[in-house]
Image (tube, grey):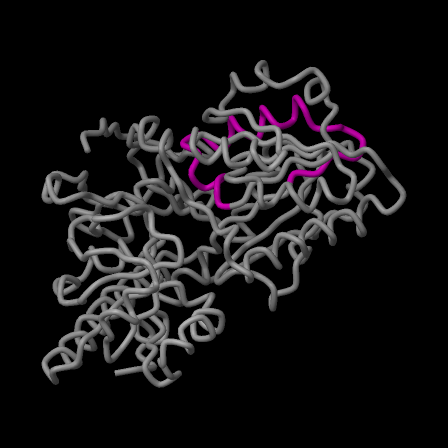
């Protein structure tokens, strides 16, 4: 894949030039890019450099990759997962019960709405829903499920494309899950949302990766060309305040229901009736120290070496190793390893196609049945947030708990 890369010289959030590089991962592919036989070796790869702004403490990239064609055929969805479905039910139920217990006919807009799985529980609870999704194929799936969806990338011009009842400060909830951190200009998005959000009671609900957890867990696979920013509670609060919002909730979903290192915040316009619930100023001292980021970068490099050592140890002992999780985590974890190609194959409950390989490491990808057809001795799980569900799914194939290795346990040095 050919893609245009452009570079910035200032913070995406506050425009400061006080940026310091904290991590570099060489020749990394896109996180959801799979290739076929004839395209092996022709996939997009570029150095992935990560910076921290010492003014607003937003961790970010300073390069943009033109992904318009890539997202047109983007197929990521977690709607098939029981864990994810439960999360979506809980967040819809919690938001409506906590903030709109006696209100009906609410309007809910989701940006990056995928196949409509998150909007479905809102619709089932009586809300009028609308999705905005860049992938044509996924948007069609949502439409077929009865979720009205606009196909396209959401930007400052998108407000004009909305139906009349979703314009002019008529929207009660704007929700976006693992999409806000993909936007090259998050400030522009926040400004656009204010044009459609009800100023008296509107809510913006955002789910992203928590940078503090990401660093402490050594989850380098979540540093991606597709991600522009990485937030902490402190950085999120600083950004939202600057754009005329107040964050009123960081705990709308209990930790036990969240997906891996999920950071969720609920914000409202400054003049809203909900501002009485405004969270007091958050301070995370370690995230204001450059030394913390440098130390965690070193730990990430050690985590990569831990994975390489485990794979070498198992394969040199004659054991066959497969990976579970043919998504961004799997692709990028393997891409940063020097021996990722030693895995027999990678499996997923819903692989993106037939006859495909991971980018850079070139590991073949199959559905779960491959584990039955060509058994392996060990399974390295990249989708560790779904470990219990994965073990239950593979138990009928004869796999036992001791055959599974959580990527996070390996990178943290808990397994050797």
Find the magenta span and give its range. Answer: 178-204
Residue 382 seen anywhere in this rendered image of the structure = yes
Q: Residue 104: image x %, image y %?
A: 85, 37
Q: Residue 142: image x %, image y %?
A: 55, 36
Q: Given the current orientation, which residue lies at the most extreme right position?
A: 102
Closest to the observer, 32 or 23: 32
Q: Residue 330: image x %, image y %?
A: 30, 58
Q: Which image quarter holds the N terminus?
A: top left
- What residue is at 68 percent from the left and 46 percent from the top? 121
- What residue is at 42 percent from the left and 38 percent from the top? 182
Looking at the rendering, which quadrant does residue 82 occupy? bottom right
Q: How many marks?
A: 0
Instruction: Say whether residue 111 is left or right of residue 323.
Output: right
Instruction: Say whether residue 149 is left or right of residue 244.
Output: left
Closest to the observer, 393 or 27: 393
- What residue is at 50 percent from the left and 31 percent from the top? 140
Looking at the rendering, which quadrant does residue 378 occupy? bottom left
Q: Given the current orientation, which residue lies at the most extreme front position?
A: 373
Instruction: Say whether residue 339 is left or right of residue 368.
Output: left
For residue 187: magenta?
Answer: yes
Q: Residue 211: image x %, image y %?
A: 44, 55
Vertical side of 3 occupied by 46: above or below: below
Residue 291 seen anywhere in this rendered image of the structure = no
For residue 144: magenta?
Answer: no
- What residue is at 25 percent from the left and 83 percent from the top? 416
Instruction: Say whether residue 336 is left or right of residue 369.
Output: left
Closest to the observer, 251 or 256: 256
Vertical side of 209 occupied by 164: above or below: above
Closest to the observer, 220 or 277: 220
Looking at the rendering, which quadrant does residue 148 occupy? top right
């Amino acid at each position: 894949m050919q893609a245009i890369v452009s570079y910035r010289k200032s913070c995406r959030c506050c425009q400061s030039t006080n940026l310091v590089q904290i991590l570099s991962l060489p020749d990394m592919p896109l996180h959801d890019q799979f290739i076929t036989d004839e395209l092996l070796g022709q996939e997009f790869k570029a150095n992935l450099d990560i910076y921290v702004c010492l003014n607003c403490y937003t961790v970010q990239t300073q390069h943009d990759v033109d992904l318009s064609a890539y997202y047109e055929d983007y197929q990521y969805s977690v709607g098939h997962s029981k864990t994810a479905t439960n999360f979506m039910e809980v967040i819809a139920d919690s938001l409506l019960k906590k903030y709109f217990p006696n209100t009906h006919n609410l309007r809910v807009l989701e940006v990056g709405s995928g196949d409509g799985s998150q909007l479905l529980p809102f619709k089932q609870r009586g809300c009028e829903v609308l999705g905005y999704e860049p992938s044509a194929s996924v948007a069609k799936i949502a439409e077929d499920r009865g979720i009205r969806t606009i196909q396209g990338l959401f930007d400052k011009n998108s407000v004009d494309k909305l139906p009349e009842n979703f314009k002019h400060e008529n929207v009660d909830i704007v929700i976006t899950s693992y999409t806000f951190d993909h936007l090259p200009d998050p400030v522009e998005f926040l400004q656009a949302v204010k044009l459609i959000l009800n100023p008296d009671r509107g809510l913006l609900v955002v789910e992203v990766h928590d940078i503090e957890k990401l660093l402490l867990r050594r989850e380098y696979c979540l540093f991606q060309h597709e991600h522009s920013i990485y937030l902490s509670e402190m950085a999120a609060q600083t950004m939202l305040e600057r754009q005329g919002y107040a964050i009123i909730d960081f705990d709308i979903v209990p930790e036990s229901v969240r997906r891996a290192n999920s950071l969720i915040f609920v914000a409202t316009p400054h003049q809203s009736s909900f501002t009485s619930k405004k969270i007091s100023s958050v301070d995370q001292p370690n995230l204001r120290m450059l030394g913390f980021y440098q130390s965690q970068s070193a730990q990430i490099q050690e985590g990569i070496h831990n994975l390489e050592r485990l794979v070498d140890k198992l394969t040199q002992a004659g054991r066959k190793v497969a990976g579970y999780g043919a998504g961004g985590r799997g692709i990028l974890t393997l891409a940063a390893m020097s021996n990722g190609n030693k895995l027999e194959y990678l499996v997923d409950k819903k692989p993106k196609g037939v006859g495909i390989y991971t980018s850079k490491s070139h590991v073949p990808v199959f559905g779960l049945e491959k584990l039955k057809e060509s058994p392996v001795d060990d399974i390295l799980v990249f989708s560790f947030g779904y470990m219990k569900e994965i073990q239950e799914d593979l138990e009928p194939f004869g796999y036992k708990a001791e055959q599974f290795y959580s990527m996070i346990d390996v990178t943290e040095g808990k397994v050797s």
